[in-house]
Amino acid sequence: MPETLSGLVTAGITFVFFCDMLRRCCPSELQQYLEKCITKLSGFLNPNIEISIREYTTGSHLKPHEAYGIVEAYLSVNSDGARKLKAQITKDNENKLLFSMDENQESVEVFNGVQVTWTSEKVSPPAQPAGSISYFSVPDRRCYKLKFPKAHKMMIMESFLQGHVMKRGREIVARNRQRKLYTNAHGEGYWSHIPFEHPATFETLAMDAEEKQNIINDLMSFTKGKEHYERIGKAWKRGYLLHGPPGTGKSTMIAAMANLLDYDVYDLELTSVKDNAELRKLLMATKAKSMIVIEDIDCSLDLTGQRKRMKKKKNKNKSENEETEMEAVSWSRSKVTLSGLLNSTDGLWSACVGERVIVFTTNHVDKLDPALIRKGRMDKPIEFSYCNYQGFRVLARNYLQLEKHSLFEEVEELMKEVQITPADVAEELMPKSDEEGAEQCIRNLIYTLHQRKSKLNGADADS
Ligand SMILES: Nc1ncnc2c1ncn2[C@@H]1O[C@H](COP(=O)(O)OP(=O)(O)OP(=O)(O)O)[C@@H](O)[C@H]1O
């Protein structure tokens, strides 16, 4: 049998060689025919298959092929065999370098026991004929080639390329990209965005440690729950209601959540949305792996039938009266209703694939319509409260890099008696000048706590 096979191979090679000779000295029709024969026969004799993943889509020099970027990202961490790498700024994130295989490099990996070989190639465009003028510069054509044994064609194409490489590559692309903070506050009915670079993390959040871990677990099990949500036939989304007094960390928590999940944030300003139709359009334009945030929902939605805007935004150039007037005008322009919001969010969940988190914040949870926060819409309420000693320790670590100090005991005692928001504690712990050291900051906080305590005692005595 091996003799027969080697005989066949020798005969095939001789035939290909013969065809090639003939091709060179024959008329063009015959040449074309022979070329086809050669391609077919050499394909038959070659035990491998090669797949090209090109940088640009066929017919367009300018539109990059998404698959190329994904494979490039995959190979940035899976090309141990390559001896030459190139470093380039990541698309979409100028702070990140992506290391990928340089041209004409080769890397081998084994998937399910099958060896596959990646190569990177670059083909320069043909030179322009002398004297011709081109207004477009044609880029080099780069491509990755994947070579693998023909016998494992389906497994490599489906499990390896479609499944493994695409999944890992997409994850790396998502990790590398610059996250975005979208806003519609300009009132034009579309999203505009800036880079999202909020430094908050769960570690820097002053909050009960157990509660914090609880929220982290909840978020992580949500992100891993694709199959679970598919199985139970529910949209892959999770709703959080953050409630508590101003300055207790609701907005900081949103940033920490987005940083943990690596999500973009859509900060939906309801008062800038013209009507329910515009709201629906905005929500439908959000992408997967994002957080949709509606802050101060009680102030920005007409829950009572009376159109009024209660929140005053600080604007240094305007007097308070002017401010209130300006906000009232923008409020009266919005015709978004509670049912519009509910229909739009419910519609979004039924129409869109991919995971999304929706977050409402409020200082007055009791004012919200039960329909808005019922189970299924808001899955997890999180209460924010005044700062306790544990929270203070986190803030002292963040702001002063202090783990312990002889004054901590006094702070602990005072915090048992006085209510103070984490925002106020943070303000006191922030050095006001270069000369102000950590100890002075704690003394400032103690002074403020004493003042509040005396006020409290005074009030008690009055009553
Ligand atoms: N729990 C917290 N942990 C760490 N920092 C906090 C916390 N709460 C408040 N801060 C600090 O106070 C500032 C204001 O807090 P934040 O905006 O998150 O409060 P909020 O509850 O969203 O307030 P509001 O209801 O007025 O929007 C933050 O920038 C942060 O520096």
Image (cartoon, rainbow, N blue to C red):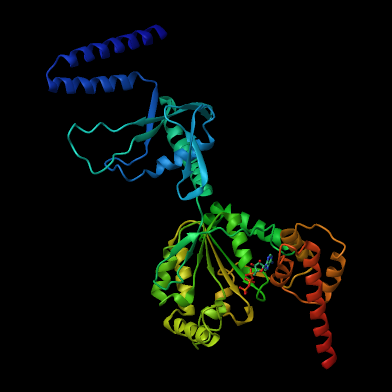
> Residue 374: percent from the left, percent from the top?
58, 73
In the depicted structure, whether residue 23 falls above or below residue 343: above
Report the side of 379 relative to 401 (left or right). Answer: left
Ligand 1 position by quadrant? bottom right
Of all residues shown, which one is farthest toward the left?
A: 27
Q: Is 405 in front, or is 391?
A: 405
> Residue 342: percent from the left, percent from the top?
49, 74
Q: Which residue is located at x 45 percent, y 73 percent?
A: 343
> Residue 11: percent from the left, percent from the top?
30, 9
Report the side of 9 relative to 24 (left or right). Answer: right
> Residue 61: percent from the left, percent from the top?
30, 42
Report the side of 289 relative to 444 (left or right). Answer: left
Of all residues shown, which one is farthest toward the bottom?
A: 463
Q: Which residue is located at x 43 percent, y 35 percent?
A: 157
Q: Is residue 21 visible?
A: yes
Report the side of 283 relative to 203 (left or right). Answer: left
Q: The N terminus is located in which quarter?
A: top left
Q: The C terminus is located in which quarter?
A: bottom right
Quarter of the rendering containing residue 122:
top left
Quarter of the rendering containing residue 360:
bottom right
In the depicted structure, whether residue 379 falls above or below residue 307: above
Q: Which residue is located at x 17 percent, y 20 percent?
A: 31
Q: Is 66 in front, or is 401?
A: 401
In the depicted structure, whether residue 189 falls above or below residue 456: above
